[in-house]
Structures are given as C-alpha cells and as structure tokens.
C-alpha cells in the first residue's frame, strides 16, 4: 500500500460514514470529517506499527506484552507478573491516546496457555473493576517475544 492510501480508502469508503456516526454518538466533538480524524500516537514502539491510531473518537491500541517499560525484556517469567505488566502497559497506551481504562470498549487477549485463563481473570478485574469491556480471549501457540505468555490489545473511546 502506498503511503496514505489507507487514509484515502477510509475517506472514500462507504463504511467511513457509519464509523464516524457511531463514534460521533460516543463523543459529539469526534464527529469531524474522516480526513481530519486519523491521529497516530507520536510514541513509536518501532518502525513497523503505531502504538495507537485514533479515528473519529476511537483509539485502536496495538497489542502489548508484559515487558518492562521501554524495553523488550519480560517483567518476569511467571504468567501473573506478565499479565499485570501487560495491563499496565495497555493502560499507559490508552492514556497516551487520550482515553482512560473505564472507556475501553473491547479487549482481545492472547494467551499461550489455556491454564492461565483464571489467573488472567483475577488480574484483569483489578484493571476493569466495573463495567468491564467486551473481550475475546484466544489461545495461541506462541507470541512474538520468546517467553511471552500474554498479549493484549484494545479499542477505547476518546472523549
């Protein structure tokens, strides 16, 4: 895809209007034209993706692992510590996008072991104590960093 072609596509696509209308119902100030609505976060994790993209009042936050802040080093080898750190990293990205954890609409969690599901729920509820967001949990063979046991991404309203 040529640089900017995704923005051009969304600007011209028939689906852009419903997305803008939905986001506008969440945040009246977010009803700006789609041409003005793409906002990549300036905090770059790497050259291949953005930490988050904001469109029409909705932040699409990239997946985070349980790594120590600013490094590719895992917080710990145990699942609970990685899960807590991943959620801290997610919170940091959500806040950097101009939102809050109570405005997260949907999370997708990727686990390498189904046996860790109960532990994830125990930690997850401490970050989303009321009205938890919609969530999907997927068991995967491996994640991009050796030893990583969890990855989480989300979509959040930016009001």
Image: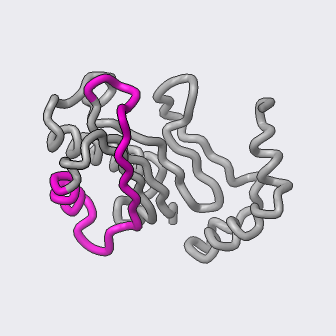
Report x, y in % for residue 34: 75, 57
Q: For the point 25% across and 29% down, which residue is it?
A: 68
The quarter holding residue 72 reads top left
Report x, y in % for residue 66: 27, 36
The quarter holding residue 65 reads top left
Is 54 left or right of 78, judged from the image as shown? Answer: right
Q: For the point 20% across and 45% down, which residue is it?
A: 84
Q: Which residues are magenta?
A: 118-147
105 or 78: nearer the viewer: 78
Report x, y in % for residue 152: 37, 46
Q: Outermost residue toward the bottom?
A: 25
What number of labels is visible?
Answer: 0
Q: For the point 44% across and 58% down, which residue is it?
A: 99
Is 7 situated above or below 71? below
Q: For the point 48% across and 33% down, which residue is it?
A: 43
108 or 111: nearer the viewer: 111
Report x, y in % for residue 40: 59, 41
72 or 70: nearer the viewer: 72
Is 115 situated above or below 100? above
State the scheme by which the image is colored. one colour
Screen quadrant of the N terminus: top right
Q: Is residue 138 magenta?
A: yes
């Amino acid at each position: 895809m040529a640089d900017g072609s995704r923005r051009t596509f969304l600007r011209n696509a028939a689906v852009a209007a419903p997305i803008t209308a939905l986001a506008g119902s969440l945040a009246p100030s977010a009803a700006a034209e789609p041409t003005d609505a793409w906002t990549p976060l300036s905090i770059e994790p790497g050259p291949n993706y953005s930490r988050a993209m904001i469109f029409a009042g909705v932040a699409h936050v990239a997946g985070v692992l349980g790594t120590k802040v600013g490094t590719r080093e895992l917080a710990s080898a145990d699942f609970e510590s990685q899960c807590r750190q991943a959620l801290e990293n997610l919170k940091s990205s959500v806040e950097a996008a101009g939102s809050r954890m109570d405005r997260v609409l949907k999370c997708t969690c990727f686990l390498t072991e189904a046996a860790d599901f109960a532990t994830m729920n125990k930690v997850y509820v401490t970050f989303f104590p009321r009205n938890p967001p919609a969530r999907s949990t997927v068991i995967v063979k491996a994640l991009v960093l050796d030893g990583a046991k969890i990855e989480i991404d989300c979509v959040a309203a930016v009001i």
